[in-house]
Amino acid sequence: MIRVQGISKSFLVAKRPSGIRHAVKSLFHREYTTVEALQDISFSIAPGEIVGYIGPNGAGKSTTIKVMSGILVPDRGTCSIMGYTPWLDRVPYVQNIGVVFGQRSQLWWDVPVMDSFELLRDIYKIPPAAYRDTLTLLIDTLDLKDIIHTPVRQLSLGQRMRCEIAASLLHSPSILFLDEPTIGLDAVSKIAVRHFIKTINKEKGVTVILTTHDMNDIEALADRILLIGKGSLLYDGSVQGLRSQFGTRRTITAEYRENAHPLQIPGATLLSWTPDRAILSVDTEQIMMSEAITQLSSQVELLDVTIDTQPIEDIIVQMYKEYQL
Amino acid sequence: MTLYFKYMMLLFKSQMQYRASFLLLTLGQCLTPFTVFAGLYFMFDRFGQLQGWDFYEVALCFAVTQMAFSITECFARGFDTFSSLIVSGNFDRLLVRPRSTVVQVFGSRFEFTRIGRLFLSAVVLIWAVTNINVDWTFLKIVALFFMVASGIVIFTSIFILTASISFWTVQGLEIANIFTDGGREMTQYPLNIYQKWVRRFFTFVIPFGCVNYVPLLFILNRDGYQHPVYALTPLAGVLFLIPCLIVWRIGVRHYRSTGS
């Protein structure tokens, strides 16, 4: 469905040192640096997938989304989405996609949400019957009934984001691009948004590509993640795969009957120790978990043991470090 | 076209949310050209005529230009303030909608307060038309209509052209106002009061002369301009739109989005 091959994009950025003197100087003479926003990015996405697109700020996430939605023209590479090349077949292509920019509104600020929806209906030339059905569905699932007649400027961020998502789905697109859809939302709104994304993916088979900094979004939604850093694709695979590849460390918290000697287990590092409690970090590549537990129980009288896998957030931070992003 | 009216209705609703601001701005827009017009009036009151042009003739010229300009500012305001769309990155939004960018930019903004300016120019136009020393024929009325209509097209073209420049410069260029505001100020007066190079520029580069000066001479029955073809010269001005739209298309291809 989506096939991206060898996409590269660079920007020419003017160097602007701070200070008045440099500002004046740059009026006459300017130095440019080339920033490689994307370097040889390739991937393909099948219909019905939810793909999480992650990476630190400035890694090229938004640039990729913009190339895929036909806003930017890449320097090199090809991109074929549903048989269209986004930047060449813009008008017929965008009829099939929905785009939500978390930080930018697509609704008209001073009028009730409903008016925006109706204008979008005319922009996308949605047939009246289809429009009515979709609208009812969206109002029910996103719980918009009470806010649909309120001007956008009076909505809370969470309410607005629900309307934004509804607005981008009015024309029943088969692909939905979400650029940081949960940015700035409270826990309740985040869960509502996630739940909804999951629902439309399951029930309508909408392919979803989302960028986010919230790893909970990824864990709740994405079957697959793409990690991008400094313009290159670093990882493409499942969340579990990421865990087994990078998250090999487990944390053991052990409580035991008082013991004066610090624990010593080869292959594990002691993170903290008191006479009745210890936290260990175990690298499962060096020592099997069962072996570690055996060692542990031979040294102390165990009362309670909890084993935690590394949170995905830590794995990502670790990966960022590893790739020096 | 129907979409354009839908946009207009929506933005009109938005504008009505701020009623007091709307009324005051409209009044202000009415008074600004009024002061210019008052200046014109007192000048003629003092000197009688300007290089063979009497007051009502110049008033007609003034009214036509002001009318075309105010209508353009009302309906093509999206292009006039286009650089803000680029700076904020909201042009991205337009690109992911399945309609032509030109229609969407037109629909992005309307300046309804220009009604004030339009009202004043209509009053001046009627005053000038009823007092001017002209035998109104059908063709002359057509010529007058074309003057306003093509004036709108030319001002719109200039707006589109200057908007296109912001694809390269991001920030809008005040220099472009030389052609919009400057063009308006120039063409309020018959072109022959200016230097030859100014006249040439505004006839052949930006064809204000075709839409304003030449048909005015036809309406006034001046020597050498009596042939009916001069009534149709405003149509030549419409051709100016074509290169402007081409530059716009190139600009859209060149667009580089901002921010995240």
Image: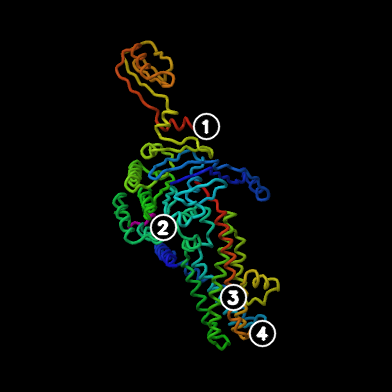
The amino acid on which the numbered mark 4 sits, given as a three-letter code, is Gly
Q: Tags 1 and 2 in contact by the CB under 8 Å rule?
A: no
Q: How crowded is mark 4: few (under 14 residues within 10 Å), some or many (20 or more)?
A: few
Residue B177, horizontal then vertical, whole percent: 60, 64
Mark 4 on the same chain as mark 1: no
Task: Decide if residue B45 is on the left or right side of residue B73.
Answer: right
Q: Do labels 3 and 4 share a chain?
A: yes
User: In the figure, is residue B109 to the left or right of A293?
Assistant: right
Asked if residue B89 lies left or right of residue A183, the reply is right
- Checking the image for residue B224, the label placed there is 4
Vertical placement of residue A119 versus B136, above or below:
above
- Chain at numbered mark 2: A
Residue type beneath disc 1 = Tyr
Helix, strand or loop at label 2? It is loop
Q: Earlier in the sequence, mark 1 or mark 2?
A: 2
* Foreground disc of the pair 1, 2: 1
Chain of the residue that carries numbered disc 4 in the rendered image: B
Q: Give the range drawn in magenta.
A: A149-153
Looking at the image, residue B137 sits to the left or right of residue A279; the answer is: right
Mark carried by residue A323: 1
Mark whose residue sits in front, 2 or 3: 3
Which of pointers 3 and 1 indicates the residue nearer the eye? Answer: 1
Neighbourhood count class around disc 3 (C-alpha, 10 Å): few under 14, some 14–19, many 20 upward? many
Three-letter amino acid code of the residue under disc 3 = Val
- In three-dimensional space, the C-alpha distance between marks 3 and 1, rounded to whole angstroms, equals 64 Å
Question: Which residue bears the numbered disc 3?
Answer: B211
State which quarter of the image contains the N terminus of chain B: bottom left
Q: How crowded is mark 1: few (under 14 residues within 10 Å), some or many (20 or more)?
A: few
Which residue does the numbered mark 2 point to in the structure image?
Answer: A108
B5 or A90, which is in the foreground?
A90
Question: Given the current orientation, which residue lies at the most extreme bottom position?
Answer: B135
